Amino acid sequence: MACGLPVIASNTGYFKEFLNAQDEEKACGNLVPLEDFKEASKEVVNLLSDKERFDRFSQNALLQVKKNYSALEEAKAINKVYEELWGQKYT
């Protein structure tokens, strides 16, 4: 995602929310059934064949990384873990 590439992931765990896959306009990738290699291959071909969709997913991926996964956001998340572990704030 940080490279601006769409993601194709299995429809397990957190991926649906992570990729915004439920909303085609905000999505940064697509989900395929777990271990369905034919469907995954088909999705790769579909993405490479649809430049508009590929570009939209790429832009959305970059926006999501910038918004949610900056060094500052990661530091805040780590700090929150320490606060929960030791019950005090660190600044």
Image (cartoon, rainbow, N blue to C red):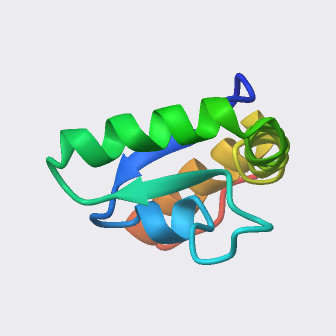
Q: Which residue is drawn at 39% across and 48% down?
A: 9
Residue 43, relative to residue 26: is it above or below?
A: above
Q: Residue 87 vs residue 89: left or right?
A: left
Q: Residue at x 74, y 47 (%)?
A: 57
Q: Residue 14 vs residue 24: left or right?
A: left
Q: Residue 71 vs residue 81: left or right?
A: right
Q: Residue 43 vs residue 61: left or right?
A: left
Q: Residue at x 69, y 61 (%)?
A: 27
Residue 60, relative to residue 37: is it above or below?
A: below
Position of residue 75 measured from the top left corner of the image (x, y, whole percent): 67, 43
- Total marks shown come to 0
* Residue 39 appearing in the image: yes
Position of residue 41 measured from the top left corner of the image (x, y, whole percent): 35, 34
Of residue 86 and residue 78, the one placed in the foreground of this image is: 78
Q: Quadrant of the N terminus?
A: top right
* Residue 83 appearing in the image: no
